[in-house]
Amino acid sequence: MSDGTDQTHPRVLIIDDSRMVRASITRHVRDRFDVREEADGEAGWQTLMVDPTIQAVITDIGMPRLDGYGLLERIRTSRISRINTLPVVVISGDDEPEVRVKAKSAGATDFISKSIGNVELLARLEALTQLARTQRDLEESRAALATASPVDPSSGLVTPSYLHHHAAQELALAQRHHKDLAVMVIEIDQFDVLVARYGAHVAQLINRKLSKILATKLRQEDTVAELAPARFAIVSPNTNMDGAGAFAMRLRAAIENIVMTYREERIRIQITIGLSSSESGRAHTVSHLIGVAVQRIAAGRAAGGNRVMGEKGEITSDMIAAGARALVSIDQILQRLRSVGPDAEVRRQLPDAIRTLLPLLELIESSFAPGLPLDVLARAAETGVAKTLQQNE
C-alpha cells in the first residue's frame, strides 16, 4: 500500500551522537534505504512524531538529552500505532549479555554490534522493514474493513453499494435455480413540496420515519437501501410480482394511515411504488430491474401518485392473485413468538401469516374435517390488514 510519498526505498532513522558512526551506517545501507539522521534520542523522537514514512529505527544506547532506553520507552508506550509498532534496532559498542537483555526488555526488536558486517546489517534491516510493511498493510486492511460498514449511519439501512452487491448475488442465485426475485422502488410523493412547506429539517425527519418503517416491515432475507432522499429500493428474493404487489399495497395503505404532527399541523405522506421482477430464462441485472421500477414510479407520479405500478400499469387490490405469497416468514414469526411472545410485531403480521397458511389449513380441513373456520380466517386475512397495521403504528 502507498504511504503517500514518492520515495523508492524504505526510510530508516539512524540515531547516534557520533557523526562517524552515522556516516558509516549510512554508507552501508544507502543503496537500499532512504536515511534520516539525528544526534540524540530527543531529536530522534521529534523526527518520529513528524515523519510518518519512517519504517525502522537504528539507535545507540548512550546519548545526550535522551538515551536509547528512554527513547524505547517513549516509542513502545506511544498512543500512535505507527510509532509503537516500529522495529527498533539497538546498535551498541558494548556487546555484554546484560546490555542485550536490558535492550530487549525495553522493547528493542533487535540488537547488533557496531562492528557488524555490511551484509548482515542489510539482511537484518530488510527483514525488519519488510515485516513492518506487512504489519502496516494488515492494520490498514483491518481498518478499512472495520470502516466499510454495509450500514448507512444516517438512515440505518444498508448502503446503495451494498444493496447492488448483495442483490447481484441474490439475482444470480435466483436465475441459477429458476426462482423469482422482486425489486420494489418506493418514492415519497411530492417530497419537494414538503421541503418547501416545512423546511429541509422536517422533510428529513419524514424521510427518516419512512426508513424506520421499511426496516421493521421486511423479512430477514429482504434488503432495503435509500437510493436518494425520498427514494428507497427493496430487493426480495423468492418473491414474484403477485407477492411484491400484495406487500406494496399493504405498505402503501399503512403509510397513508400515519399521521405526523409539526407545530400543531398534521402531516400525512403518500408513496408511489414501482415494481419489477426477474423472469426465468431472461437475463437481467440489478441496475436494470431498479431502472424499470423507477420508470414505473414516473408513470405513477404522472397519474397523480399514491399508486403501486407494475408491468401493466397500476396494481389494485382486486388484481392481486388470491394465492399471492405474502412477504412473511412463518418460521420467523414462530421464532419471535417463542422468544418475546405475542408482541405488536407478531400481531402485525397475523393477516399475512393467515394468508400464507390458508392452503395448508384447507388441506387439513378436507383431510380431517376438524371444523376450522376457513371463511372467518380468509376474511380476517383480507379485511384485517389495514386495521392491524394502523393500530400498531
Image: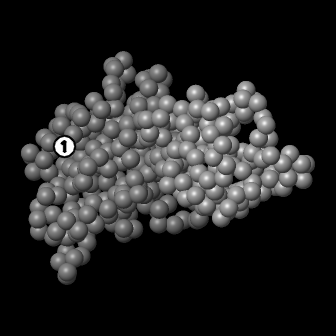
Label 1 SS: helix
Residue that protrudes farthest toward the bottom in the picture? 264
Q: Is residue 265 left or right of residue 73?
A: left
Q: Position of residue 122 (x, y in %)?
A: 69, 30
Instruction: Locate residue 161 relative to residue 335 in the image: left or right.
Output: left
In this rendered view, identify the residue nearer to me: 259 or 235.
Answer: 235
Q: What residue type is disc 1 on?
A: Ile
Instruction: Work out whether residue 109 can be spotted.
Output: no
Determine whether, in the image, residue 125 is placed left or right of residue 327.
Answer: right
Q: Residue at x 37, y 22 (%)?
A: 280
Q: Can the viewer see residue 228 in this picture?
A: yes
From the viewer's side, name the closer residue of 154 and 123: 123
Task: Residue at 47% x, 46% y: name it.
Answer: 148
**Image position, residue 113 (x, y; %):** 80, 41
- For the point 76% across and 30% down, the residue is 117
For residue 169, which quarter of the picture?
Answer: top left
Left or right, 127 with respect to 207, comes to right
Name the image quarter holding the C terminus: bottom left
| Residue 143 spot, x, y in % from top left | 53, 48
Q: Which residue is mark 1?
A: 297
Other-residue count near label 1 (Cα within 10 Å), few / some / many at <14 / 14–19 / ≥20:
many
In-front residue for pair 85/382: 85
